[in-house]
Structures are given as C-alpha cells and as structure tokens.
C-alpha cells in the first residue's frame, strides 16, 4: 500500500507460469555486443599504426605518445558514438603496458613483446584444447549461438551484425523484457545430444580450432623472428604485425561463420520442429 501523496507504481507484468524469483541467466548477447564488430577491429590497429609512423619519424618517445594518443582517441570516439567502451578500455590498457615495456627498455621493438607473448600463448592453448576433445572454438561458438537452436542456420552468409541480430531474434523472440530490463532471461532448452557427441560437430570445431590456433602461433613465431632481427628499425616488424592481424583475422571470421552456419543447418535438421501455435482469437 502506497504512502499518502504517493502514486502507486505499476507492478511489472510476469509471464504465466514464470516465478518472480526466476534465476538470472548470463546473456550471451552482452558478449556479442562487446566484440565491437569490424569497426572495433579497425580501431584496435590505430595505436600500432600511430606508433610505427611516429617512431620512424621522430624516435621512440614520439612513438609512445602517438600510440597512447591514438588509444585515447579511440576510447573517446566510442564514448561519443555511445558504443560499448569495454573493448576500447582493454585496448587502452594493452597499449599502456606495451609502451611501458618499450619505455623501460628504451627499445622500440619491445612495444610488440606483449603481442608476441599473447599470440604464442593463445595458439598453444587453442591447439592443446583439441587434445582434450574440447576445441575452444566450439566452446565459444556454442556459448554465443547454440547449434541445437539453429540460430545461424540461414543458407546465406549475411554481415556480422545481421547474423548476430538473427541469432538474437531466434534465441529471444520476445525482445527485451518489460521496462527495457535485460538481466532476466529464460534459460536455453537443453539439447538432446551434446555437440561433442556429434562426430561431425567435434571434427569441424577441431579443424576451426586448428585454424585459429595455427594462425596465432604462426603470427607469434614470425613476429619473434622479426623481433630478433629488428634492433633499430621496427618498420618490418610493425608492418607484418598489421598484415597478419586485421586482414587475416577478418578472413578467419568469415570462414568460421560459414562453417558454423553449416553446422547449425546440420544440427537443426536432426531436431524435430515443434508445431506452430494457432493465432490467438
């Protein structure tokens, strides 16, 4: 009962059969929104480009300030565009570590040490996951868009943002909850068979994991070789890092989406379709 002079606030509607204390379910789409899309991938390369150009023109100190300025500019632009700043924050943090290492050693090539260690480490972790029959690309793909729901089973390969929108529409056709709340979601229905029990799914995800792990490892090894060769001029090291970064990653994403969409069609063909409900009178 509301106090005198206070307006009674309407109670949010609750779906039939759904308890008020429904458990909070982690929303995978919040993860998708943090990826940043193609623009986020391009933004991530700007500090490296700024460092390479400024370092070649006016030395290490200028390169450090240029990289920090570019990372800060990306962060501010994402705030102005009202986009998720999480990726920009993590990028700013990574650039800060990279320039701190370079500044401490006094060598421009040490700006790339963090990236080299990261690439080799990710490559080893990805490749090792195959030996345990838990290919990490499959784990991530099934978390973001479970194949038994067929969220990506379209016969075309639309753009990345459209594909995420399709997955969101299939997984949560009701859209946002009343009042714009997105923290309460119904749990996804459990699959009749885990994707690891399907030989085709396990084999495909294993090869995708080999692709991603091999590219990470190869990128790190090539960078390490050039790092050992680049004591004064880091132009070659920086250029190769950029070439093996955004373009190769974009190609990997396209291949991965194509394979995953075929796996979703394969999985959805094995699941009987539920009969459609007649329209309400």
Image (tube, grey):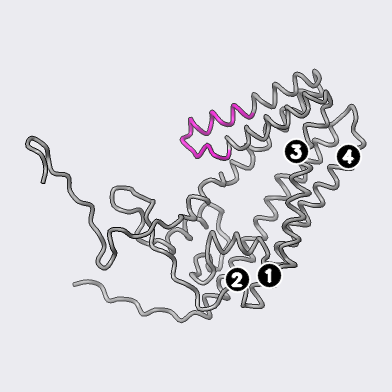
Q: Which mark is residue 226?
A: 4
- Earlier-in-chain disc, 4 versus 3: 3
- Residues under numbered marks 4 and 2 in contact, where contact means CB atoms less than 8 Å apart: no
- Residue at 80% across, 35% down: 238
Report which residue position mark 3 lands on.
Answer: 114
Q: Does residue 73 appear to the left or right of 165 in the view shown?
A: right
Report which residue position mark 2 lands on.
Answer: 263
Point out the stretch of residues depicted in magenta. Answer: 71-87
Disc 1 from disc 2: Cα separation: 8 Å
- Residue at 47% across, 60% down: 166
Element under disc 1: helix
Disc 3 from disc 1: Cα separation: 31 Å
Disc 1 from disc 4: Cα separation: 33 Å
Residue 73 on the magenta segment: yes
- Residues under numbered marks 1 and 2 in contact, where contact means CB atoms less than 8 Å apart: yes
- Quarter of the picture containing the C terminus is bottom left
């Amino acid at each position: 009962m509301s106090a005198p002079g206070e307006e009674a606030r309407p109670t949010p509607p609750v779906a039939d059969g759904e308890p008020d204390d429904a458990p909070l379910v982690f929303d995978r789409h919040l993860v998708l929104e943090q990826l940043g899309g193609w623009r986020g991938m391009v933004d991530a390369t700007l500090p490296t480009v700024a460092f390479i150009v400024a370092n070649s023109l006016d030395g290490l100190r200028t390169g450090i300030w240029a990289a920090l300025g570019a990372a800060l500019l990306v962060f501010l632009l994402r705030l102005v565009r009202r986009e998720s700043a999480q990726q920009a924050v993590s990028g700013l943090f990574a650039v800060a570590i990279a320039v701190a290492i370079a500044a401490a050693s006094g060598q421009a090539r040490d700006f790339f040490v963090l990236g080299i260690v990261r690439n080799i480490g990710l490559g080893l972790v990805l490749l090792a996951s195959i030996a345990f029959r838990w290919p990490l690309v499959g784990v991530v793909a099934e978390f973001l868009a479970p194949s038994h729901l067929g969220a990506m089973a379209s016969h075309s390969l639309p753009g990345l943002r459209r594909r995420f929108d399709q997955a969101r529409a299939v997984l949560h056709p009701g859209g946002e909850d009343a009042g714009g709340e997105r923290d309460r979601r119904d749990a996804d229905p459990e699959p009749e068979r885990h994707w690891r029990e399907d030989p085709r799914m396990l084999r495909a995800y294993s090869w995708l994991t080999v692709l991603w792990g091999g590219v990470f490892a190869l990128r790190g090894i090539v960078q390490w070789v050039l790092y050992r060769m680049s004591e004064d001029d880091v132009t070659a090291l920086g250029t190769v890092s950029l070439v093996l970064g955004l373009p190769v990653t974009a190609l990997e994403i396209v291949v991965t989406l194509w394979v995953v969409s075929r796996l979703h069609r394969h999985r959805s063909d094995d699941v009987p379709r539920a009969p459609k409900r007649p329209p309400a009178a």
